[in-house]
């Protein structure tokens, strides 16, 4: 099948569009491809992430704590391949997120996996490829 230039992607509904744009842009080196009052499209080499502002009447019912409370009862989790999980700990914190401690890491399918949360509590999985010398 011939590609039309579109990438696979995800849509995430957010309360604070500006904060979430800054978080995902900085932590995952995503560039703004399109920006409007109620949405933002971020892109990396392999992924398009659309952030959509939830309507005000819904947003008022969403409580975001500091640090963010983990939202685990959702049927999806975003996963990003990263160079170094430990480097992202500080960057996540700087932008309002949290990366789980190193003691929670696990290995699966050639990667070291670790969860964290974005500033609104959405669980994000970080995957660092296992380095082999030689």
Image (cartoon, rainbow, N blue to C red):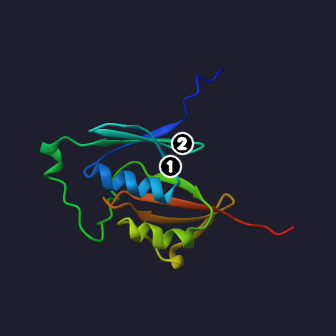
Tag 2 near tag 1, CB within 8 Å: yes
Distance between the alpha carbons at the discs numbered 2 and 1: 9 Å
Which mark is first along the chain, 1 or 2? 1
Q: Where is residue 101 in the image (x, y as percent from the top left)?
A: 48, 77
Q: Which of marks 2 and 1 is in front?
A: 1
The residue positioned farthest toward the bottom in the image shown? 103
Q: Which residue corresponds to the image point at 82% horizontal and 69% vertical from the top-left? A: 133
Horizontally, is 128 left or right of 131 in the view?
left
Q: Which residue corresponds to the image point at 51% horizontal and 74% vertical from the top-left? A: 104
Q: Position of residue 98 (x, y in %)?
A: 40, 69
The residue to which callout 1 is attached is 30
Whether residue 5 is situated above or below residue 32 in the rendered picture? above
Helix, strand, or loop for circle 1? loop
Q: Position of residue 1 (x, y in %)?
A: 66, 20
* Camera-side residue of 26 and 74: 26
The residue to which callout 2 is attached is 47
The residue positioned farthest toward the top in the image shown? 2
Q: Which residue corresponds to the image point at 30% horizontal and 66% vertical from the top-left? A: 68
Image quadrant where residue 13 sits? top left
């Amino acid at each position: 099948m011939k590609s039309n230039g579109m990438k696979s992607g995800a849509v995430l509904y957010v309360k604070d569009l500006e904060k979430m744009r800054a978080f995902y842009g900085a932590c995952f080196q995503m560039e703004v491809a399109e920006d409007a009052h109620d949405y933002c499209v971020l892109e990396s080499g392999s992924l398009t992430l659309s952030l959509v502002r939830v309507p005000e009447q819904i947003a008022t019912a969403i409580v975001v704590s500091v640090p963010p409370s983990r939202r685990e009862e959702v049927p999806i989790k975003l996963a990003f391949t990263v160079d170094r999980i430990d480097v992202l700990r500080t960057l996540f914190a700087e932008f309002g997120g949290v990366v789980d401690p190193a003691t929670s890491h696990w290995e699966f399918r050639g990667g070291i996996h670790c969860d964290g949360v974005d500033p609104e509590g959405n669980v994000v999985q970080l995957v660092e490829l296992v380095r082999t010398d030689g």
